[in-house]
Image (spheres, helix red, strand yellow):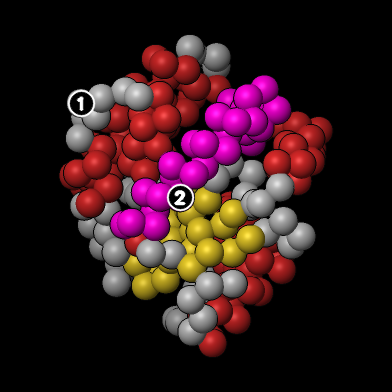
Amino acid sequence: MPIKMRIDGGDLSGKNSTAMKYAEAFPSVDGSTYEIRTNKLTAFNPFFDLAKYAFSKGMPEHLAKFLYYPAAIKDACTYRDDGSEIIQVSCVATRGLAYIKDKGIRDIFGLEKMVERLPESEHNFYLRVRSIDEIVRRLDIRRNFEREQLTRGDLLAETDPDRFIRREEILFDIIKQRFNPSVIFTDNMTPTETAMVISQSLCGGRDRI
């Protein structure tokens, strides 16, 4: 398989932190550290970097989001298995598809086809948070201590919680249909604990946690 592990989940579910804790605690088969790729599948994707920059500088959401479509196309057309031990955290195509489904936008860029073409991985996990209160608590922590990671998607948990929950449900359905992931509820877990659950799941072969 070209990708060792895929970790998906809604905003503030702990995806990146869990991936980093897992990579720190469990080296790959050859003893090297896993490479963590967040959202983009290819190590070099200038379209993604441009979109992320524009979004961070306050470009209106409906315009900034359109910049991510070339990034998804770049991933779909140029991804190759280069032998790296990769933990893939989310990706542009799945999140973009969830966004347009939530907004009721026609899929003129073929994101559904791109999702179908996404590379397989050996193990697939989806992190969920049951409580919106827990999500808002994490939002406060990010706002106060990890502000550089704060996104407009995160802020929906506070400004429009119904839409936040709806968008996460749409994303989950997309990931479930494409990858049938093991689901981990992280409400009362630290990223380190979630990484340990993933490790135990891989050893024990459990389908759901």
- The disc labelled 2 sits on which kind of residue? Phe
Q: How many marks?
A: 2
- Percent across and percent down for residue 45 are 34, 38
Magenta includes 152? yes
Looking at the image, which residue is at 49% across and 84% down?
205
Mark 2, Cα crowd under 10 Å, few <14 / some 14-19 / many 20+, is: many
Residue 42 in view (yes/no): yes
Please provide the residue range marked out in magenta. 149-178
Sequence order check: which comes first, mark 2 or mark 1? 1
Looking at the image, which residue is at 30% across and 30% down?
69
Quadrant in which the N terminus appears: bottom left
Quadrant in which the C terminus appears: bottom right
- Compared with residue 49, is residue 194 higher up or lower down, i.e. above or below? below
Looking at the image, which residue is at 43% across and 57% down?
88
Return the mark for residue 108: 1
- The disc labelled 1 sits on which kind of residue? Ile
- Badge 2 marks a residue whose secondary structure is helix
- Percent across and percent down for residue 144 are 81, 33
- Compared with residue 181, is residue 170 higher up or lower down, i.e. above or below? above
* Magenta-drawn stretch, dominant element (helix, strand or loop): helix
Q: Which residue is mark 2?
A: 172
Magenta includes 176? yes
From the viewer's perspective, tell me whether residue 57 is left or right of residue 158: left
- Compared with residue 167, is residue 3 higher up or lower down, i.e. above or below? below
